[in-house]
Image: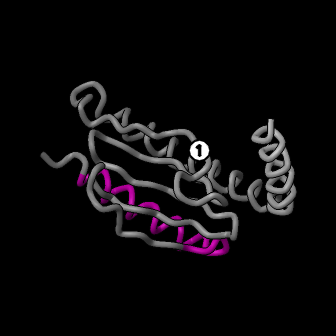
Amino acid sequence: MALNERLEKLGQVLAERERDLSSDMDRAFGYAHKLHDRLASALDVFHAQVMEDAPQLALTLSEVEVDEKHLHSVQFQLERGRHRAVFIVKSRGEVTFVGPFRAGKTEGPCRSFSFSSADEIEKALEDFVVAFVDQAATP
């Protein structure tokens, strides 16, 4: 029973700590969903061009979820085969693009931007995704 009691107490302490960050996490999720929707729309256009004649070029966009490495961040991934690109949105108001890279290899490179840099993020997103698709579609 001691384990239950200790985890109950720890759960209370951690929940209290995280409660103070809930609005920042809500903002991160909101920004990530906005970025995800922007990318999903662009991928619809890409898939309309390739699916009939080259379905092997199809890309997969994951759902937005809590980041695998950073507790106070959220992420989603773009994939084709072993090729990966990770989009991380941090609760402190920052977006990081990781990749492109191959699964099982070193992640990187990384580029980070403040939420307030909307024009810079849009341009970087364009360059990043085009580079990813080009790399992922190269035999």
Q: In the depicted view, which residue is nearer to us: 19 or 121? A: 19
Amino acid residing under circle 1: Val
What colour scheme governs how the chains and residues are painted in the rendered image of this protein? Answer: one colour
Q: Quadrant of the N terminus?
A: top right
List x then y, in percent, for residue 31: 67, 56
- In the picture as drawn, the residue positioned furthest to the front comes out as 2
Q: In the figure, 43 relative to 122: above or below?
A: above
List x then y, in percent, for residue 115: 65, 70
Q: Residue sitting at 38 percent across and 64 percent down? A: 127
Q: Quadrant of the C terminus?
A: top left
65 displayed left or right of 97:
right
Instruction: Report helix, strand or loop for mark 1.
Output: loop
Q: In the figure, 90 relative to 63: above or below?
A: below
Q: In the figure, 105 relative to 37: above or below?
A: below
Residue 114 is covered by the magenta coloring: yes
Q: Residue sitting at 23 percent across and 54 percent down? A: 135
Range of magenta residues: 113-135
List x then y, in percent, for residue 129: 38, 56
Q: Residue sitting at 52 percent across and 42 percent down? A: 41
List x then y, in percent, for residue 87: 50, 56
- In the picture as drawn, the residue positioned furthest to the top comes out as 52
Residue 121 is covered by the magenta coloring: yes
User: Which residue in the protein does label 1 denote?
Assistant: 64
Q: In the depicted view, which residue is nearer to us: 50 or 110? A: 110
Q: Residues within 10 Å of mark 1 (few under 14, many from 20)?
A: some
